Amino acid sequence: MVFSAAQLIRRDGVAATGLRDIVAHAQAPRGSLRHYFPGGKEQLVNEAVEWAGRYAAKRVDRFLAEMPEPSPSRLFEAMVRQWTDEYRSAGFATGCPVVAATVDRAGSAESTRQAAAAAFDAWNRPVARALTEMGVPAGRAASLATLMISALEGAIVIARAERDARALETVARELGPLLDAGVAPRD
């Protein structure tokens, strides 16, 4: 149900995603909601947001494993490519469930705001770690990781609005040199 909630939230947002929709998508018995999610929809949304943060964090290692020569720009290109590939094959119907939950609930549900902040942190840490391993000074790696994630999320929103991957391609192209310039020169 957590996965189903994340998929529906990334498509429709929190407000438009009903518990019945989640149960139907998960093909789960309705009674399982109360059993597994005694905190109701808010708990389920928060767990979906946390799942999304863990998923994004795990993707970083997968992207790195596929690169013969990792670099900051190549990592960012892989992060972007995941979305451009999805949009080209399936259309622009979905976005990030963390962003959707933040937009819909951060002002009204403190636990969801905290879950979203934790999800972004869970994603930021492996990106920063990867950048450090590529030679970016530790003091700068977290900032560049935040820049990468922020630019990606903003480009996803623009791509969905425009029904065009242009914004994603633009951030990858324009940020690549800046990200690679963050690597400290080797002696």
Image: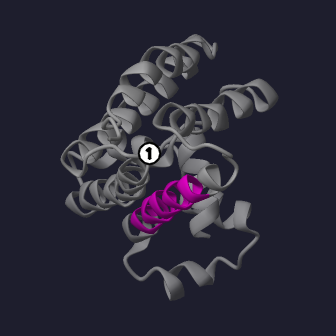
Q: Quadrant of the C terminus?
A: top left
Q: Nearer the viewer, residue 129 or 79?
A: 129
The residue under label 1 is which amino acid type? Answer: Ala
Image position of 67 (left or right of 72)? right
From the image, tell me which residue sits under label 1. 15
Please report the residue visible at 68 percent of the width from the left and 46 percent of the height from the top.
68
In the rendered image, residue 105, in percent from the top left (x then y), is placed at 31, 48
Q: Nearer the viewer, residue 45 or 60?
A: 60
Please report the residue visible at 63 percent of the width from the left and 33 percent of the height from the top.
83
Image position of 135 (left or right of 56)? left
Q: Residues within 10 Å of mark 1 (few under 14, many from 20)?
A: few
What segment carries the magenta color?
45-61
Please report the residue visible at 52 percent of the width from the left and 16 percent of the height from the top.
173
Quarter assignment of residue 40: bottom left
Classify 146 as above or below 45: above
In the rendered image, residue 170, in percent from the top left (x then y), is placed at 52, 13
